[in-house]
């Protein structure tokens, strides 16, 4: 189930994505996605779109979706 999500994010959104944890656990995975943008608004838009796409998949159960921003002045602010 992980590979279709990873490949879907990679091809649909042209993002860097990988399975980052729980490789040895059955029915559990952690997927990391990297977004680079010239504006914080665009980065948030991309992350929100990816999150909606992942949550819309009926074939997986999502327990949590976390977003971490770098510690910069613009990370939480507006454009």
Image: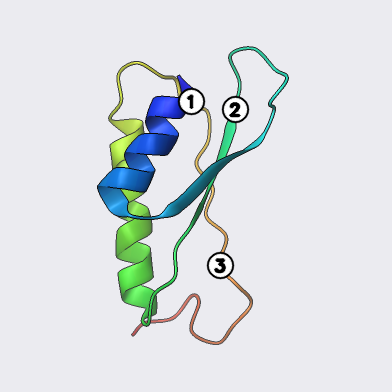
Q: CA distance from mark 1 to mark 3?
A: 24 Å
| Left or right of 53 on screen, residue 65 | right
The x, y position of residue 13, in whole percent, is 30, 52
Of tags 2 and 3, the one toward the viewer is: 2
- Residue at 40%, 55% (x, y): give it: 15
- Tell me the number on the disc at residue 72: none
- The local secondary structure at tag 3 comes to loop
Dot 3 alpha-carbon crowd within 10 angstroms: few under 14, some 14 to 19, many 20 or more: few
Q: Give the Cα distance between marks 2 and 3.
A: 21 Å
In the rendered image, which quarter is residue 54 located in? top left
Q: Nearer the viewer, mark 1 or mark 2?
A: 1
Q: Nearer the viewer, mark 1 or mark 3?
A: 1
Of the numbered discs 1 and 2, the one sitting upstream in the chain is 1
Residue 34 vertical placement versus 22 (above, below) = below
In the picture, the disc for residue 29 is 2
Instruction: Give above or below for 55 relative to 10.
Output: above
> Regarding mark 1 in the picture, which secondary structure is present there?
helix
Q: Residue at x 68, y 26 (%)?
A: 23
At a point 32% along the width and 59% down the height, the residue shown is: 46
Query: Looking at the image, do the residues carrying marks 1 and 2 touch, with CB atoms under 8 Å apart?
Result: yes
33, 79: nearer the viewer: 33
Give coordinates of residue 59: x percent, y percent. Answer: 35, 16
Label annotation for residue 2: 1
Q: Residue 77's x, y, as percent?
A: 44, 81
Q: Secondary structure at mark 2?
A: loop
Residue 20 falls left or right of residue 57: right
Q: Which residue is mark 3?
A: 69
In the figure, 22 relative to 47: above or below?
Answer: above
Q: Nearer the viewer, residue 23 or 44?
A: 23
Label 2: few (<14), some (14–19) or many (≥20) C-alpha neighbours in 10 Å: some
């Amino acid at each position: 189930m992980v590979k279709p999500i990873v490949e879907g994010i990679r091809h649909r959104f042209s993002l860097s994505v990988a399975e980052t944890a729980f490789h040895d656990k059955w029915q559990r995975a952690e997927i990391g996605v990297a977004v680079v943008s010239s504006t914080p608004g665009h980065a948030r838009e991309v992350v929100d779109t990816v999150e909606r796409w992942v949550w819309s998949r009926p074939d997986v159960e999502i327990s949590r979706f976390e977003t971490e921003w770098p510690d910069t002045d613009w990370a939480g602010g507006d454009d």
